[in-house]
Image: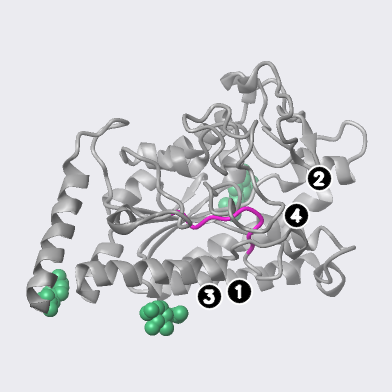
């Protein structure tokens, strides 16, 4: 009896998987990979913080004003980079948050990203609850257990997971909500920028190895860019008309500069690993006015402590503002970031693969 049950389940899952792949696709044509897993912070979060006790939430208006479902927990007006990448990879639906994903939907991938999350567990503790990188990995392990149960075969699950794309965006909060807040965190007093960057990279590298051990092979790591240029940091530390704060950028660059060697190390030490680095500095729109962005510093929504004010006002032309709130880009630059990460126009942007190449490997 148990065996019959298993076979029925197995057949159901396989049928569902086939249906998902053959379903007429609404967005951009054929789905290029079976699954997309997303890890990261508020730049990728799509609702995982909605039921957490935290100030890092975006499930209220005017967030989502340009998103079909309205405010969902995405920290922008419309789609985030993970959404655009799902579209570019041919998915007909966005990847569901771990907080709500159910049953066979997890075979399309899961989004674990959480606003305020960091590489370090203590990062953003003053903001409230958040799902750190280590917790996101534990959640991924839970997903994998469910998948293995549904498929009834661990080897098959691992084979399946090796075909997925994993995108990862971490480290912003380890600066914004840790190292750059010396009044609340000891890291700044204890470590020079170079040492702190090394600590982050050492942890991050271990975390990415864990992801590999869980079956990931095609992993995209987004670098950091321009934390010293976000409106809220400028309000805190900027002077006059400065567009970026050099001391912040130089501290964060110490971290970014170590990402490429980290990728090399992972690729040469882990069999069949295909990690790739996206250089967010070089991906930044060189001439924002070419895509209609004329307001580089001023956020679009009415701000309260860096975030959009509950029910607050918004700017008249949302496509003209680079920043949506005090920290997060609006939909227009998110689209460009995703497009350039998917198809790199310059070899300096991705190392060694862009996401379209990675999907073909
Ligand atoms: C992952 O989950 C499995 C099954 O639930 C468990 O046995 C294992 O210890 C977990 N691994 C880690 C690293 O937490
Ligand atoms: C599990 O899947 C692997 C790989 O597809 C296959 O070789 C193996 O026979 C399967 N095992 C069982 C018990 O079905
Ligand atoms: C990223 O791109 C910028 C600008 O093109 C370049 O100056 C920097 O060296 C690159 N960083 C890495 C780690 O490749």
Label 3–label 2 contact, CB within 8 A: no
Residue at mark 3: 206
Residue 176 marker: 4
**Quick one: SS at disc 2?**
helix
Q: CA distance from mark 2 to mark 1?
A: 26 Å
Query: Which span of residues is magenta-colored?
Result: 111-118
Residue at mark 2: 233
Residue 75 in sight from this viewpoint: yes
- Tell me where residue 339 sits by quadrant: top left
Side of 152 relative to 82 (left or right) = left
What is the basis of the colouring in this image? one colour
Of the two numbered discs 4 and 3 on the same chain, state the one appearing first in sequence: 4
Mark 1: give few (<14), some (14-19) or many (20+) Cα within 10 Å.
Answer: some
Mark 4: give few (<14), some (14-19) or many (20+) Cα within 10 Å.
Answer: many
Mark 3: give few (<14), some (14-19) or many (20+) Cα within 10 Å.
Answer: few
Q: Is residue 339 magenta?
A: no
Give the percent coordinates (x, y) of residue 221: 50, 56
Q: CA distance from mark 4 to mark 1?
A: 19 Å
Of the two numbered discs 4 and 1 on the same chain, state the one appearing first in sequence: 4
Side of 193 relative to 3 (left or right) = right
Of the two numbered discs 2 and 1 on the same chain, state the one appearing first in sequence: 1
Residue at mark 1: 202
Give the percent coordinates (x, y) of residue 218: 36, 59
Looking at the image, residue 240 lies above or below residue 121: above
Label 1–label 3 contact, CB within 8 A: yes
- In front here: 208 or 331? 331
């Amino acid at each position: 009896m148990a065996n019959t049950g298993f076979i029925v389940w197995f057949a159901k899952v396989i049928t569902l998987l086939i249906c998902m792949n053959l379903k007429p696709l609404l967005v951009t044509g054929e789905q290029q990979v079976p699954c997309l897993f997303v890890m990261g912070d508020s730049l990728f979060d799509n609702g995982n913080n909605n039921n957490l006790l935290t100030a890092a939430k975006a499930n209220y208006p005017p967030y989502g004003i340009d998103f079909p479902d309205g405010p969902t927990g995405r920290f922008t007006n419309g789609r985030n980079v993970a959404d655009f990448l799902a579209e570019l990879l041919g998915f007909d639906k966005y990847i569901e948050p771990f907080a709500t994903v159910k049953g066979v939907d997890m075979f399309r991938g899961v989004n674990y990203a959480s606003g305020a999350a960091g590489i370090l567990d203590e990062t953003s503790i003053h903001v409230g609850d958040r799902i750190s990188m280590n917790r996101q990995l534990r959640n991924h392990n839970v997903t994998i257990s469910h998948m293995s149960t549904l498929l009834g075969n661990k080897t098959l699950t691992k084979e399946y997971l090796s075909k997925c794309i994993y995108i990862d965006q971490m480290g912003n909060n380890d600066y914004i909500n840790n190292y750059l807040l010396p009044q609340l965190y000891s890291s700044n007093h204890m470590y020079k920028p170079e040492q702190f960057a090394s600590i982050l990279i050492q942890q991050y590298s271990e975390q990415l190895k864990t992801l590999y051990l869980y079956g990931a092979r095609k992993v995209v790591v987004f670098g950091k860019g321009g934390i010293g240029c976000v409106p809220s940091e400028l309000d805190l530390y900027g002077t006059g008309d400065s567009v970026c704060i050099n001391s912040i950028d130089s501290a964060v660059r110490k971290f970014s500069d170590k990402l490429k060697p980290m990728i090399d190390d992972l690729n040469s030490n882990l069999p069949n690993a295909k990690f790739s680095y996206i250089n967010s500095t070089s991906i930044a729109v060189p001439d924002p006015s070419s895509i209609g962005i004329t307001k580089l510093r001023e956020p679009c929504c009415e701000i309260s402590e860096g975030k959009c004010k509950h029910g607050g006002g918004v700017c008249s032309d949302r496509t003209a503002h680079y920043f949506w709130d005090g920290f997060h880009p609006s939909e227009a630059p998110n689209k460009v970031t995703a497009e350039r990460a998917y198809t790199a126009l310059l070899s300096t942007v991705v190392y060694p693969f862009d996401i379209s190449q990675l999907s073909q490997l």
